[in-house]
Amino acid sequence: AAIGAHGSMNGIDFRKKLGDEVMGRFLVYNHNPYENCTPLGASSQGIPISINSEVMSCDLKIGLGSIVPHPFSGYGGGSKVILPGVASMEAIDSNHTRLGLSPTIGIGKYEGNILKQDMDEAARMAGLDIKIDAILNLKREITALFVGDPIEEHIQGVKLAREHYATDMVTDCDIVVANCYSKANEMVLAPRVASPLLSQKGGDMVLIVVTPEGQINHYWTRSFGKKFGGRAWASKTTLPPNTNRLTVMAPYSDKVSADWVAPYNLINWAKAWPEVLQMLKKTYGDKAKVAVIPDATIQYFPEVCY
């Protein structure tokens, strides 16, 4: 499982993804970014590339994934299955930190994205033979499939993804309701998509987060204490841009899960939609400009490259 710096999967996760038959026939392992990675040298950007030793021991390397908008590489899928997918923490940290401030990166930014180019180089160094990438709809169903050379198939897939996930943009909204569905356990993706829709004078952002398992564990960027976190963790001190009030509608309470979006004490919590609706009506009455994003974790607005 190419989990990068994310927390490990358990048997329930594997069976949901792979099914009982696959689990019964094949050996299925979690990637560990801290151990058992084989050094392959440095990329042309000077990033030290080390890749999972089990992966490197294989004669044929096939990656499975999907292409969705991504805040670092422009679009997910392709070579990301190698870096960060099965790379060492040093490689992940160096790639994301040294190249992560470049103006070439961001949601929808693909051509010339130096961070993505570094990932492509890592995939070549690792000898990834074939990549299979899906395009998904808002029900997480496969609508198109791209198979072949890990870089070339991704180039073709992004051509479709760029149109497929694009959403008509509205601005100057009083309220933006952002549903977190496809990546409900990564609600951190939603505010950067929702913020540009709000009025410059500020408004209400509502994140709908229904995930009983909570937010993903992320060893690189999540918190592991009130004042401690991964290498890229930084304590949030403000609400997202253009946001006067941030409401997280989450039927399963998990305060820690929100700290990579905003400070705990600045978040308004609700468990059900009627509670949110009552609050908004009390503030705006029956007159408000509202935008609803069906899935703010995979949709994007072409007018804004984040």
Image (cartoon, helix red, strand yellow):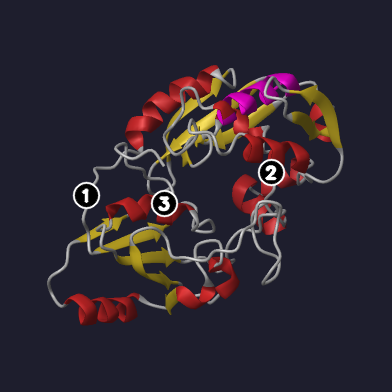
Residue 88 in view (yes/no): no
Estimate how packed mark 1 is, as few (under 14), some (14 to 19) or many (20 or more) residues with alpha carbons within 10 Å. Answer: few
Q: Can you identify the residue that label 3 sits on?
A: 192
What segment is highlighted magenta in the picture?
115-128
Helix, strand or loop for the magenta stretch, by majority: helix
Q: Is 303 left or right of 35, judged from the image as shown? A: left
Give the mark nearer the N terminus: 3 vs 1.
1
Q: Is residue 35 visible?
A: yes
Compare residues 200 and 173 and report the one nearer the observer: 200
Whether label 3 touches label 1, CB < 8 Å: no
Q: Is residue 123 magenta?
A: yes
Q: Which residue does the numbered mark 2 point to in the structure image?
A: 4
For the C terminus, the quadrant is top left
**Residue at the image position 41 percent from the left and 51 percent from the top:** 192
Q: On screen, 297 above or below 142?
A: below
The residue at 26%/81% (across/down) is: 278
Q: Is residue 227 magenta?
A: no
Q: Secondary structure at mark 3?
A: helix
**32 or 131, nearer to the observer:** 32
Q: Identify the residue at horizontal 70%, vertical 56% (top origin).
A: 230
Residue type at mark 3 is: Arg
Mark 2: few, some, or many residues within 10 Å (few <14, many ≥20)? Answer: many
